[in-house]
Image: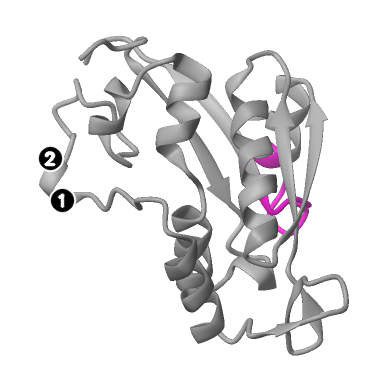
C-alpha cells in the first residue's frame, strides 16, 4: 500500500442543521458516496480503500483497527431505504426528498486549492441526486472555508457539509 502522507482528509456534517441531525441520514449519504470510484478518479489507485473511514491516521497509536470501522460500501438501495426509514419518504415535483415540509437541500463548502474536494463533491452531487438530495456546491478558497466552519461562532455556522485536510508529523 502506498500512502500519500501522514495526514487526513475529511468531510464534516453540520449536525445542528435539521436535515443532518439524524445519524441515519448522515449514514445514508455515506452509503451513496462511491469512495472506490473517487479514489480511482482522484488518485488512480484503490490502495487507500483499505484505510477505511478512520478519522485518525493509520500510522497513529490511536488508530482503532480496520475491523472496528464501517467501510460504507457504495449502496444506493441501502441509502434510499435509510432515508425512507428516517422519515424523508416524500418527494417534491423536482424529485427532492421532503420531511415535515422541508426539502433535503444541502450546501457543501469546497476549497479550490486541492483537486480532491471538488472531485468528491461532484461525485456526491451526481449520486445524491439519484437518492433525492439537492446538493449545492459552494467553491471558495481554503481560508474562507476555515473561517466559515471552524472559526465561526456556534449558531453562525451557515453550512451543511465541508471538506478539509491536514498534514501531520509522526507522533
Residue 118 placed where, x, y %? 67, 28
Range of residues picked out in magenta = 149-161
Residue 62 placed where, x, y %? 18, 34
Pointer 2 local density, CA inside 10 Å: few below 14, some 14–19, many at least 20: few
Q: Is residue 70 above or below residue 59?
A: below
Residue annotated with mark 1: 68
Q: Is residue 128 above or below residue 81?
A: above
Q: Looking at the image, which residue sits at the far right?
A: 93
Lateral position of residue 145 relative to residue 35, left or right: right
Are circles 2 and 1 on residues that touch, CB within 8 Å?
Answer: yes
Residue annotated with mark 2: 65
Q: Is residue 38 above or below residue 142?
A: below
Query: Which mark is drawn over residue 33?
Result: none
Q: Is residue 47 magenta?
A: no
Residue 6 placed where, x, y %? 32, 14
- Please, what is the dominant secondary structure of the magenta stretch? loop
Residue at image x 51%, y 55%?
A: 32
Amino acid at each position: 500500500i502506498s500512502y500519500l502522507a501522514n495526514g487526513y482528509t475529511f468531510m464534516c456534517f453540520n449536525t445542528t442543521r435539521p436535515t443532518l441531525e439524524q445519524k441515519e441520514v448522515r449514514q445514508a449519504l455515506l452509503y451513496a458516496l462511491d469512495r472506490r470510484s473517487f479514489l480511482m478518479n482522484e488518485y488512480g489507485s484503490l490502495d487507500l480503500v483499505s484505510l477505511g473511514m478512520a478519522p485518525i491516521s493509520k500510522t497513529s497509536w490511536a488508530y482503532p483497527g480496520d475491523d472496528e470501522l464501517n467501510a460504507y460500501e457504495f449502496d444506493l438501495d441501502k441509502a434510499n431505504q435509510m432515508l425512507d426509514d428516517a422519515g424523508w419518504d416524500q418527494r417534491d415535483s423536482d424529485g427532492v426528498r421532503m420531511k415535515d415540509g422541508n426539502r433535503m437541500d444541502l450546501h457543501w463548502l469546497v476549497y479550490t486549492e486541492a483537486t480532491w474536494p471538488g472531485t468528491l463533491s461532484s461525485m456526491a452531487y451526481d449520486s445524491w441526486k439519484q437518492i433525492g438530495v439537492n446538493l449545492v456546491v459552494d467553491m471558495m478558497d481554503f481560508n474562507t472555508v476555515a473561517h466559515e466552519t471552524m472559526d465561526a461562532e456556534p449558531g453562525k455556522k451557515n453550512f451543511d457539509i465541508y471538506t478539509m485536510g491536514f498534514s501531520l508529523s509522526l507522533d
